[in-house]
Amino acid sequence: MSKSKYVTQVCTSCGRESKMEIIGEVVGAENKVWYRCTRCHHSMMLDSAAKKKEDNIITYIREECVNYSPEKIFAVGVSIYHTDWDDMGKVTSKEKTSSGGNAIWVQFEKSGIKKLIENLQLAD
């Protein structure tokens, strides 16, 4: 059986879950392999016996999640609960929108990856 050329992991540079291209083994280190993110092209060393995506199932506890509101500010790694969708997820990255606002990328249990607005300033 041949080895796969890619593995799905969260990139330490861009913070998004993406396909990581295997670019070579680490000399002198057992079970370590160099990977390159296919999105941001950042190279990093990972354990070659890393768990597959299916093994990295995250379970959320509703009481530990912060309720989502566009007016709030969220940190990467925070678990949130979206009341309209009745779904929990984890903030995976943040970015500036083209209009100058702020947005977060959230990996939800049911809805998948979604882009949400944060720190929305309402005009009085």
Image (cartoon, rainbow, N blue to C red):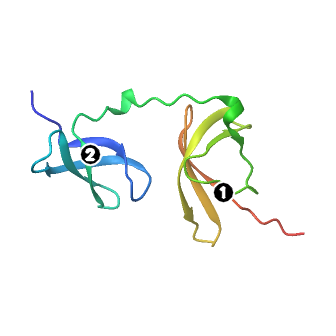
Separation of disc 1 and disc 2 at Cα? 32 Å
N-terminal of the pair, mark 1 or mark 2, is 2
Q: Secondary structure at mark 2?
A: strand
Give residue 94's position: percent from left, percent from top. Answer: 55, 59
- Residue 26, disc: none
Tally of numbered tags: 2
| Residue displayed at 23% across by 43% down | 6
Residue found at the very far front of the displayed protein: 28
Question: What secondary structure is found at the residue carrying circle 1?
Answer: strand
Q: Are marks 1 and 2 in contact (CB under 8 Å)?
A: no
Say left or right for 92 vs 47.
right
Q: Position of residue 31 (x, y in %)?
A: 18, 39
Question: Which residue is disc 2 drawn over?
Answer: 46
- Residue displayed at 59% across by 55% down: 104
Which residue lies most toward the right here?
A: 124
In the image, residue 44 above or below residue 108: below
Give the position of the C terminus as an image quadrant: bottom right
Image spot of residue 89 (x, y percent): 59, 38
Identify the residue at horizontal 61%, vertical 59% (top origin).
Answer: 103
Tell me the amino acid under the disc marked 2.
Leu
Check disc 1: other Cα within 10 Å, few if <14, some if 14-19, many if 20+.
many
Q: Position of residue 68 (x, y in %)?
A: 71, 45
Tell which tag, 1 or 2, sits nearer the viewer.
Answer: 2
Q: Name the image quarter holding the N terminus.
A: top left
Looking at the image, is 87 positioned above or below residue 40?
Answer: above
Identify the amino acid type marked 1. Answer: Ile
Q: Nearer the viewer, residue 31 or 52?
A: 31
Residue at the image position 62 percent from the left and 35 percent from the top:
88
Count neighbours of disc 2 (C-alpha within 10 A) and say few if under 14, some if 14 to 19, many if 20 or more: some
**Circle on res. 117:** 1
Task: Specify whether 54 is left or right of 65.
Answer: left
